[in-house]
Amino acid sequence: MDNKENTPDISAFLASAIHDMKNSISVLMRFLDDNITKLEPEAQHEAAPMLYEVQRVNDNLLQMLAIYKVGNQFYPFDLTENSIGEFVREVAEQNKSLLSYLNIKLDIDCDEDLYWYFDHELVVGVIAHALNNASHYTKDKLRLVAKEEGGELVIRVEDNGRGYPGQVLDAGDAVNKGVDFASGSTGLGLYFSSMVAKLHQNRDKIGSMQLENGGTYGGGCFILRLP
Amino acid sequence: MYKEVKDTTALFAGKSYLIVDDFQGMRSMMREMLRIFGGKNIDTATNANEAIAFLEKNRYDVVLCDYNLGAGKNGLQILEEGKHRDLIGLATAWIIITAEKTSDLVFGAAEHMPDDYIIKPVNEATMKGRLEKVLAKKEVLGNVEKAVRAKNHALTIALCDKLLSTTQTNAAELLRIKTSTLMTMEQYDLAKQVFNQILAKRDIPWARTGLGKVAFLRGEMEQAQQLFREVIRSNPAYLEAHDWLARTYESQGNLDEAQNVLARSVELSPTSVVRQRNLGEMAQKRGDLDAAATAFRKTIKLGEHSIHKAPSAYLNLAKVCADKGIPSEALQVLKNAGQEFDNPEVQLHAKVIEGTVYSKSGDHNNALKLSRELAAIAGSDNNLPAGIMLEATQLFLATGNKEAADNMAQALVKNNHENAELLGQIGELYDQAGMHGKGEDLITTSRQEVVESNNRAVMLAKEGKLDESIQLLREARVLLPNNKRIMINLTNVAVLSMRQNGANAELMQMSRECLANVAALDPQEKWCSQVQAALDALDV
């Protein structure tokens, strides 16, 4: 008997499943946000990681879908000119409640008058994911920087935690060089960030992603450079 | 420096909103968000029909519309219908809420684009920020859009330039409007200059595509092809470049490549009725019957809920099925077309194809029956589209109805005596029917009659006998209502007469009628814009 006959074509379900999941995530996030607000500060602190978890589910979904579409040449890569002030505000607002429940202070340093070309969905995806991650590993401070340096837009997410462990830094380097990528969800996030960086090209320059320890607060530091 | 969010309750309070979503949880969530922002006047719809009913009753300032609404129209199709039926004014901000970004949504036709799209999950912060931005954009671009709608090109350009010189916000949109207006005005050098200025700073796909369009419109096909291919190489999902590359290959006569590109554009834009139809027509032209049948079947299915639903996909599918040797499907499709489209021309065309289906499948009795029926209805009708007349001639020849074939062919020649391609096709039909030379003879004689009466009219006009010339051409036009040359000459002589004797309501109306008919018969005809200007000058 041929078992393959019984395996349905998953792509037939993909579109409607994603549609449903995205609706569910929207409602779930909204519910959590609404109800955590009503709690006492201590209970808020305890419940906040649920927001982090839902955000992770969403990030993974977004990342897998984008990687799949880019790989199959279906991703509508949409290079538009974005106001950096608006972009930073949008990302910061999205993470505002999680950070406040966890008593994490977010410092913002950006060039409000700067405009830059990038695919809005993808870059918001990368930076929101980096912020969500950092909120999990930081002590009590985060810093989001978006500025032009040497003809590139450089976006940094810095924290004052203990920094990235050695194997994550190695994985970041490897992904960047296109050698290999780590398994598990760390690998997915890094691969996605690096893919997004490389999709952004201008003339002979190409975007890049970098992990390092140090920065202004001496913790982990995620850097995205877009030409 | 970084600025905090400002209070915008007043902005939201005065607006009216429509939310369209099939999922109850999303509807109530979005309504609640709008209320928090200050919105008061909020309607909700659960599907396309409800949404359209609301749009028929009210003018909304903001529509938040889910993309995937299950069965029926999707969010973009509602927008398209709303614009087409003028249910949505310039001031309405249409925002699509979607689970995923698609080529359709991002790179589709500019006139059917939403004002913005938000990718789920929807959260309060994003929703508020985007709404503020879109409303601000609507306000700034309001006058520009008005000028665009009024087709006031000079004003459009002036407004764009003024806004572009003051702020960088909306620059991309303004440049898009400006360049497309320049191209409409056939100011290709100026459009090219703008595209090159943008490209000097950064390689933007739409600007490179714009250069390609300029090359295409100037007939520089090699150049156009190269530009569109470059865009697609660096941006494989860029839909617009695919649309134009297919057109370029087609006008270069490379139909194989044109079909390949259309097949790819259909993959990128799986719900587009127009792209499926283009693919079907290209495949049919190339004789790729399987691909043509598949594409036409999809066109019909997708068109069910669309404003692009049209009889041509049904009729073409029937022809393809006849050629593929599946007469049963062909007849069924024709029956469906008859039920779906209450239009005498479609009904008549369907009958011609039905006869052809019988003839090709060897059912001579039914073929003959239809051939006779058609000869009785349309035998003397000179006012049918050339395509239908040509097919009818073929059917008459195939069923041995020589007299009807000759009548139809004569009318066809006289109405199109300067159309070399069509005359060639008529000759071929006679050759294929085993009557070599007969077609040529018929064409020569029929053509001669028209040429002579035209020449006579031109001669009379040259001699200054304008009234006689007009009279002769009027009579010719009654007999040959679709002859371009007769209408052009008639209008030219009428213009001459009005220049001498002053404008005349009757001649003016007739001239405008001729102009409209010629433009409908041949949209490429350069004469139209010249005579339009001449008539406008007289008509003051």
Image (cartoon, coloured by chain):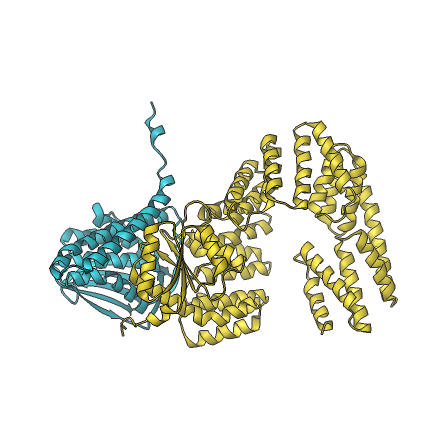
Chain colours: A cyan, B yellow
Residue B238 in view: no
Question: Measured along the vertical axis of the image, is residue B363 above or below residue B40?
Answer: above
Q: Residue B84 is drawn in which quadrant?
A: bottom right
Residue B285 percent location from the top left of the image: 60, 42
Residue B299 percent location from the top left of the image: 53, 44
Q: Nearer the viewer, residue A114 or A12?
A: A12
Horizontally, residue B231 falls left or right of residue B182, namely: left
Question: Measured along the vertical axis of the image, is residue A111 above or below residue A61?
Answer: below
Residue A62 in view: yes
Question: Measured along the vertical axis of the image, is residue B252 above or below residue A116?
Answer: above
Q: Residue A112 is drawn in which quadrant?
A: bottom left
Residue at screen point 84% across, 46% down: B445
Q: Residue B137 is drawn in which quadrant?
A: bottom left
Horizontally, residue A167 falls left or right of residue A74, namely: left
Residue B27 percent location from the top left of the image: 35, 54
Residue at screen point 41% across, 64% down: B16
